[in-house]
Amino acid sequence: MTGPETDPAAALAALEALAARPVLLALDFDGTLSPLVDHPLDARPLPASMEAVERLAAREDLVVALVSGRGLEELAQVAGPVPEGTWLVGSHGAEHGRVRDGVFVLEPFELAPEAQAAQEALVAQAEEIAARHEGVLVQRKPTTVLVHTKMAEAVVEDLATREAVALGKEHGLKTVVGKHIVEIAVHPATKGDGIDVLREATGAAAVVYLGDDTTDEDALERLREGDVGIKVGGGPTHASFRVGSPEDVAELLGAWATSLGR
């Protein structure tokens, strides 16, 4: 991977240069639309970002999607009202839904029995890790188990992270270390899979993807020639462009919406 362009003006120029239509605008939620928070259910999108998303979604040649590792019901809860027609991809591509007539229509999803059993065992063992380390929380998602470490002291976070990674390896499951989080998957779906599904479902001629974390690289790596990938924050990336924060995302989306409206 080569280093991405860090000038926000370059990212805006790439968006403005998109000629193929329709465009699928796929947005990670945590760390992209919403600043990272200590408690997952406290997350909310920045008002400026959602105002820009509403302007973009109103265009007939652009489709908006929220892509998250959260389960769809939880994503719908924290995202709040989103524009009509917005797609939602949860559980790293395993769950899909869409807003129709102001209501989230969610496709049914259920883990296979063996995956359910694996998740139960993981939750119990992860909670043992959390019990030993102050500031560490465990969260069950439809296809994963998360160990949150944002509220832990640095030394404690490092130890809990290593223990959680070892737990995932012990079970032979995909384990990803993100920003103050370890995510252990009992289902193989990735955000890249979610992008592929959305590209086909929407007939998108080009995809724009914005994401901040390790799991977003699965989607950024899946982009094709003519697509635009934008990394939010630091870290190695497959994206061609980088912006610094969710606030920068709001500014970029707002500028693009203004440009398209001219």
Image (cartoon, rainbow, N blue to C red):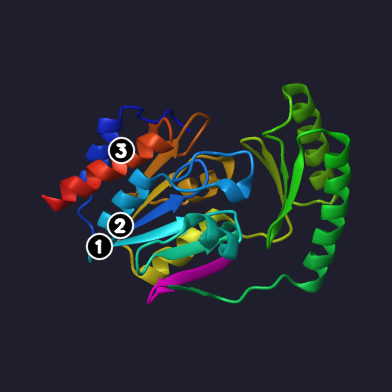
What secondary structure is marked by label 1? loop
Residue 240 shows in the view: no
Numbered disc 3: secondary structure: helix
Residue at image point 44% right, 30% down: 2
Label 3 Cα crowd, 10 Å radius (few <14 / some 14-19 / many 20+): some
User: In the image, is residue 26 above or below residue 8?
Assistant: below
In the image shown, does 235 or 227 lie closer to the viewer?
Answer: 235
**Magenta region's main secondary structure?**
strand
Using the image, determine if residue 20 lies above or below residue 242: below
Q: In this figure, which residue is indicated by the disc labeled 1?
A: 58
Q: In which quarter of the image is residue 103?
A: bottom left
> Mark 3: which amino acid?
Glu
The quadrant where residue 249 appears = top left
Whole-number angstrom distance, CA of label 2 to CA of label 1: 6 Å
Answer yes or no: do the residues labelled 2 and 1 have beta carbons within 8 Å?
A: yes
Counting residues from the start of the chain, the first of labels 3 and 2 encountered is 2
The x, y position of residue 256, in whole percent, is 24, 45
